[in-house]
Image: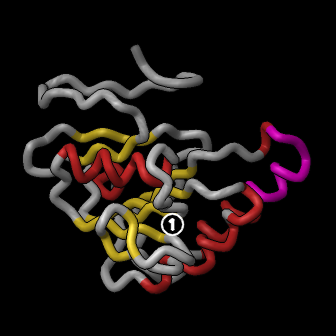
Amino acid sequence: MLDALFKPRAVAIVGASTKELSIGNVIIRNLQEYGYKGAIYPINPTAPDVRGIKAYKSLSEVPGEVDLAHIIIPAKFVPRPSRSAVGRDQGGRHQLRGFSEMGEEGKKLQEAFLANARRGGVRVFGPNCQGIINTDPALRAYCNFTFTYPEAGSVSVVALSGASAP
């Protein structure tokens, strides 16, 4: 049930960016440099590619199945990607930008996003998630925007914190 999140075969980055230090660029760089074995699908409506990988204007244009979608666009645009993914086999997704903690408007956006996800059978991990890391050499999924690459090992950490787990 959680394989799509922790063992993603394909990762989409909704909000992929050509700006070097933006979250949408750093996640792709981390996947590339850490040696991720799956497919990477940058989603950017204007860039033809991000970090040398063909970009798609929306999730609905991605040719393959996506297990994990990072959604890192402003909250007011987030309900839209959920609708474009309805009917696709998307097992996991996480959102990096907050909603309900920003007030009533944010709460309504979060409810719309979650309603679209439920209709499409999409599981949501977040909002306000930094990402996941799977150090298994067969996968090497560094789906995160931090700058510290962990060594492979036999210890797992699941943390709920305002920034990261020490």
| Residue picked out by circle 1 | 122
Q: Is residue 98 left or right of residue 22?
A: right
Front residue of 51/135: it is 51
In the picture shown, does residue 120 fall above or below 102? below
In the picture shown, does residue 112 fall above or below 149? below
Q: Position of residue 111 (x, y in %)?
A: 76, 58
Q: Is residue 148 magenta?
A: no
In the picture shown, does residue 98 fall above or below 42? above
Q: What amino acid type is highlighted by mark number 1?
A: Val
Q: Is residue 106 magenta?
A: yes
Q: Identify which residue is drawn at 30% across, 39% down.
A: 133
The residue segment tinted magenta is: 102-111
Q: Secondary structure at mark 1?
A: loop
Q: Quadrant of the C terminus?
A: top left
Q: Identify which residue is drawn at 20% across, 53% down.
A: 36
Image quadrant where residue 82 sits:
bottom right
Q: Position of residue 115 (x, y in %)?
A: 69, 66
